Image (cartoon, rainbow, N blue to C red):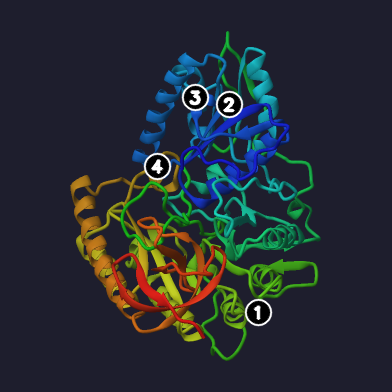
Amino acid sequence: MKGIVAAVAPETAKRNLYIETYGCAMNLADSEVMASIMQAEGFKTTDDPLKADVVFLNTCAIRDNAEAKIWGRLKEMKGNKRKNPGMIIGLMGCMAERLKSKLLEQDQLVDIVVGPDAYRDIPKLIQQVEEGQRAVNVLLSREETYAEITPVRLGSNGVNAFISIMRGCDNMCSFCVVPFTRGRERSREPESIIREATELFEQGYKEVTLLGQNVDSYKWDASTPLSNPTTVSTPLSNPTTVSTPLSNPTTVSNSLSNPTTVSTPLSNPTTVSNSLSNPTTVSNSLSNPTTVSNSLSNPTEHTYSNTSENVVNFAQLLEKVALISPELRVRFSSSHPKDITDEVLFTIKKYDNICNYIHYPVQSGNSRVLKMMNRTYDREWLVKRLARIREVLPDVGISTDAIVGFCSETEDEFQDTLSLFRDSQFEFAFMYAYSERPGTLAERKYEDDVTAEVKSRRLAELVALQNSISLNKKQDYIGKTYRVLIEGFSKKSNDDLKGRNDQNQLVVFPAGKGYAKGDYVNVKIERCTMTSLFGRVIVD
């Protein structure tokens, strides 16, 4: 996402900031936090890097090709710096920690490297660069949530907004680097979340998406100091120095030594192709992952977590946000199957403005592969839990993630993933060929022994299957009427409007007098493609 700017530039701003964001919705939310910090320092955002005083690339390192794109972009930015020698180039996000030395010392492509928990430090790091140093801070925190910072909405349509409710991850999926790049899991104080959502609604926003690496494990405990975002930040590793003189660019920062991030995008969920800005999966307990605690009890009974008046879990947070207004839609991303409790399901069922949609990242359909992935469940459990979700929420839209060609995956095991897709009938899916990332448990424990050719063939086969399923699922919408939140004009024509229904399906319909962005309309679906629904507004 290149050159996104704030809707309103502060009149007092004297310097230009260019932010280029790659990857998941969490990265976009981080860019908005960083823009807010910089705005307070007299910066305004620009969509032209050549006009920028400071340039930041917010990076994704989910796969090799993601990193390759960022390396290429950094070289382009270095060319821009020749035209504007005073330009400061910074790299933030998930590539920061692992590649800090190479970025600062070997290739000297950037002036600043900053990790996800150090954005408050950026103004100081800029000052260090202006004094002739290169600067780096990639220390991870056990407390930082940026709770009191109001994000600057970048590239906003004024209708949809992201709200980060937690950071980090305590799970250890063997293919995933999030625990190493974003640190330990910590939840944001609920009242700050409610306040942010309320302010957005008062500003005219009609939909908020609650973000986290694994939102279902959200838990605020007022009695636990580590839950309190106002506590002084404590790095997870020994903090040494965070800046290096140009004459001796040896960086010395200790933190969790790893780099990539695997998180869920909120890009157009109707597509099933590979994209840079994708992957969800963020869960698996740091403890022995042999048990899973989701109830499969009778759906007429609520299964509630043991909570005290000092504790707020995710279902309770969902309810608090839903109660702001029935006109405020609520979505969330991303989930881990093991943490989707009955309490969450019944909360979705109770409130019409909590969208009837769940992202359910299975990753594989084979139990042995799932165990190697450290996902804490097997195929049988996945199927039962999915049935439970649909039992409580019959009209729910469900999407998923899958990785093909994971270490030692056999052809028969891949067929298990195909059969799970056939049986589960997901609305859409994010699918990838396994890409080994340095520092992950899988990289340390397993051989990446499935050939690139086999991975590509399996991925193509799974994508083709899901394309067929997605089209069939969309055909089920034809003839039915759905409430759609208008997000703006269709990409292809200003004669059409677009929005999404409860199930997160993209709906396109003719523009009409009196229909405006942010309005709700009832649309009867008349036809579909693999990616979109088409219909007309029904007036009561």
Q: Is mark 1 on a helix, strand or loop?
A: loop
Spatial CA span between label 2 and label 4: 30 Å
Spatial CA span between label 1 and label 3: 54 Å
Say if mark 4 contacts mark 1, CB within 8 Å.
Answer: no
Q: Residue 437 carries which label?
A: 4
Task: Estimate the x, y position of residue 170 in percent, counting from the top left.
Answer: 58, 54
* Precedes in sequence: disc 2 or disc 4: 2
Task: Judge by depth and name the residue closer to the eye, 412 or 264.
Answer: 264
Spatial CA span between label 3 and label 2: 10 Å
Residue at (56% x, 64% y) in the render: 332
The residue singled out by tag 2 in the image is 54
Q: What element carries label 3?
A: helix
Instruction: Tell me: residue 423, above or below residue 229.
Output: below
Spatial CA span between label 4 and label 3: 33 Å
Answer left or right for 139 relative to 198: left
* Precedes in sequence: disc 1 or disc 3: 3
Answer left or right for 325 relative to 161: right
